[in-house]
Image (cartoon, grey):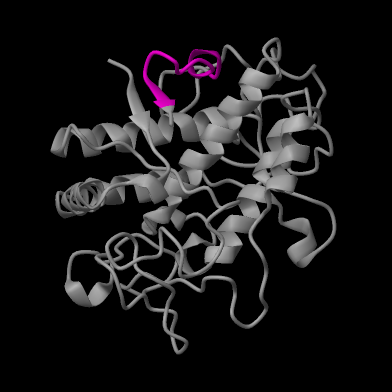
Amino acid sequence: MVYTRKDVSTLTPSERRRFVNALLEVKRRGEYDEFVRTHIEYYAPDGERGLRVAHMAPSFLPWHRRFLLDLESRLRRVDESVTLPYWDWTRNRTPTAVPWTDDLLGGTGRRSDRQVMTGPFAYRYGQWTIKEAITDAEYLMRDLGRSRDPIALPTAGDLKETLADPVYDTAPWNSTSTRGFRNKLEGWGSGRGAVSWRNHNRVHRWVGGHMMGGASVNDPVFWMHHAFVDLVWSRWQRRHRDARYLPAKQPAPGDAQRGQVIARHERMPPWDVTPEELEDISRIYRYE
């Protein structure tokens, strides 16, 4: 049966509670940290040699689509009524808006150390200890809006421009691709600092704390953010119905990207699944 992913701002109090409780139970079982480890392992920048699948590559979107499905499956084993909500950051744009409420994700971190002090994922409540991260801190950290050097979340206009590109991705298939929907949505731009962070990347930096880097899965907002990114991909697919995942085949021999990116029919680690198999999700879930 096809299930529905909802805008987090439309969840009822009961739906919010059940979603939070399912996340906490997956964490209690030790399963959640497996997802953190997986994301850290596959967070490989394009400055390194070797295969890239999770970021700075065409497979950014199908890789995270499968990643979300895996977490959603774990949540639904706990409570079959739960699905991943999405956070539309073009509409809910302030540090006090949904999902930053006490009954969902809690708010920003305190000024001294960025520790989140409110909501069910605050360290002081003993149910959300950080075990897999770059630092030794055991508490969840955030800096919503970047208090010392403020930035704004992406706008609906930013997404409109991104959705207009009719090509999925283009050579050199990495963070320097100036054309193609994938990199415009992933958000690697030219220049330095805030001007170079667009869409997906800008949201990670706006949240700050653990959302900065490979250990970003430690913040539950990761899933709401990427569910919205996935929704944007599905909107692009509907708009450009003849467009497909690219590259269809591996780059030519001698191309620096050969063997570093996943072609349409190739398997994406750590799963036995291809980008092509994840292009159509209409029999699994839909967005409301």
Residue 69 location (% of width, % of height)? 36, 30
Provide residue 3's location: percent of width, then percent of height.
Answer: 32, 24
Q: Quadrant of residue 253?
A: top right
On screen, residue 18 above or below 148: above
Q: Nearer the viewer, residue 15 or 174?
A: 15
Quarter placement of the N terminus? top left
Which residue range is magenta in the image? 275-286
Q: Is residue 284 magenta?
A: yes
Task: Compare residues 230 and 26 and report the one nearer the observer.
Answer: 230
Where is residue 173, by image quadrant?
Answer: top right
Asked whether, in this view, residue 92 is left or right of residue 152, the answer is: left
186 lies above or below 210 = above
Q: Is residue 263 left or right of residue 160?
A: left
Is 285 in front, or is 210? 285
Along the horizontal axis of the image, is 145 left or right of 164?
Answer: left
Q: How many marks?
A: 0
Q: Report the side of 178 relative to 127 (left or right).
A: right
In the image, residue 260 sits, relative to residue 272, either above or below, namely below
Q: Identify the residue at horizontal 26%, vertical 51% (top origin).
A: 16
Magenta stretch holds residue 154: no
Residue drawn at x 18%, y 32% is: 80
Q: Is residue 274 visible?
A: yes
What percent of the width, then of the height, locates residue 250?
Answer: 70, 17
Q: Is residue 148 above or below residue 193?
A: below
* Residue found at x 59% / y 74%: 146
Residue at (82% x, 23% y) in the render: 254
Q: Quadrant of the C terminus?
A: top left
Say whether residue 37 is visible: no
Query: Which residue occupies the foreground of this view, 46 or 10?
Result: 10
